[in-house]
Amino acid sequence: MSPADAWPPAGTVPPDASDRPGLRAEIAEGVRWLSRHRLLRTLALTMAIGNLVFCAAFAVFVLYAAQRLGLGEVGYGTLLLSFAAGGFLGTLVAPGLIRRFDASPLLRLGLLIEVALHATLALTREPWAAAAMIVIFGVHTTVWGVVVTTIRQRDVPSTMFGRVTSVYAFLDLGGAALGSLLGGVVATAFGLVATYWAAAIAMALVVVFAWRPLRSATLTRELTAA
C-alpha cells in the first residue's frame, strides 16, 4: 500500500466512535422524521399491517390448500407457483401501469386487491379461483413495491434515508413475524376460514384508514423527467 492509500490522510484525526449517535438515537430520529411525513407514514403502517395479516393467513396456507381446496403435494406446489407467476407478470406490466395511472390509483387498487385476496380464499373451494386471485395479488405486490420504493427514494433526504429505511424494515419484518404467530392461534381457535375472514376485515379497515392520505401519492415528476 502506498502512502497515498493510507487512511486517514496525513494530518487528519479519525472520527471518534463516541461522537456518532447511537443506534437507538438514529432509529428514534428515523421514527420522528417518518411520523411527520403523512404519505410515507401511511405507507409504512399500511405495509406493517398488510404483512401482519398476510403472514397470519399464509402461516396456515398448506393446511388450507389440503383441507379447503383438496390439493395434494403437486397441487400445492402448483398453487405456490402462482405467486411467482404474478410477481413476474408484475415486472412486465408495472412500468406501463405507472405511466398510465400514476401512484395514487395504483396504491388504492392494491389495497382493494389485498381485501379481495383474503375474501376470495375465505369463500372459494376451487383451486383455479384461488390461483387466479393469487396471480393478481402477485402483480399487485410488484407494482406496489416499485411505486413505494420510488416515492421513498424521492421524498426521504439522503441524510435520513438509511434511518427511515431501517424503520420501514423493522415494521415490515415485525409485522411478518407477529402475523406468522397469530395465524396459527386464530386458526386453532376459530378454524382455517376464520383466519382469512379476519385478514379481509383487517385490510378493509386499512383501506378506510389509508384511502385519503394516498390521494397525495404521485410519480408525475419522475415520469416527466424520464
Image (cartoon, rainbow, N blue to C red):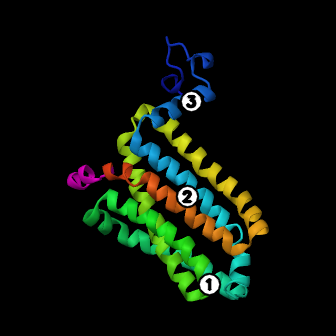
State the residue in front, 92 or 152.
152
Mark 2 vs mark 3: which is more N-terminal? 3
Q: Quadrant of the N terminus?
A: top right
Mark 1 surroundings: few (<14), some (14-19) or many (≥20) residues within 10 A:
some
For residue 143, which quarter of the picture?
Answer: bottom left
Q: Position of residue 137 (x, y in %)?
A: 49, 71
Q: Secondary structure at mark 2?
A: helix
- Tell me if label 1 and label 2 are in contact, CB under 8 Å: no
> Of helix, strand and loop, which one carries label 1?
helix
Q: Nearer the viewer, residue 195 or 23?
A: 195
Q: Amino acid at mark 3?
A: Ala
How far, Cα to Cα, is label 1 from label 2?
24 Å
Visible in this render: residue 142? no
Q: Taking 205 as reference, is 74 above or below it?
A: below
Asked if residue 52 lies in the magenta stretch, the reply is no
Of residue 185 and residue 60, the one placed in the foreground of this image is: 185
Quadrant containing the C terminus is bottom left
Image disc number at residue 28: 3
The crowding category of the residue bearing disc 2, from other C-alpha atoms within 10 Å (few below 14, some 14 to 19, many at least 20), is: many
Q: Is residue 196 left or right of residue 91?
A: right
Can you identify the residue that label 2 sits on?
Answer: 50
Under circle 3, the secondary element is helix
- Residue at 57 percent of width and 21 percent of height: 20
Q: Which residues are magenta?
A: 217-226
The residue beneath circle 1 is 78
Q: Is residue 71 left or right of residue 49?
A: right
Residue at 48 percent across and 24 percent down: it is 4
Cα distance, mark 3 to mark 1? 44 Å
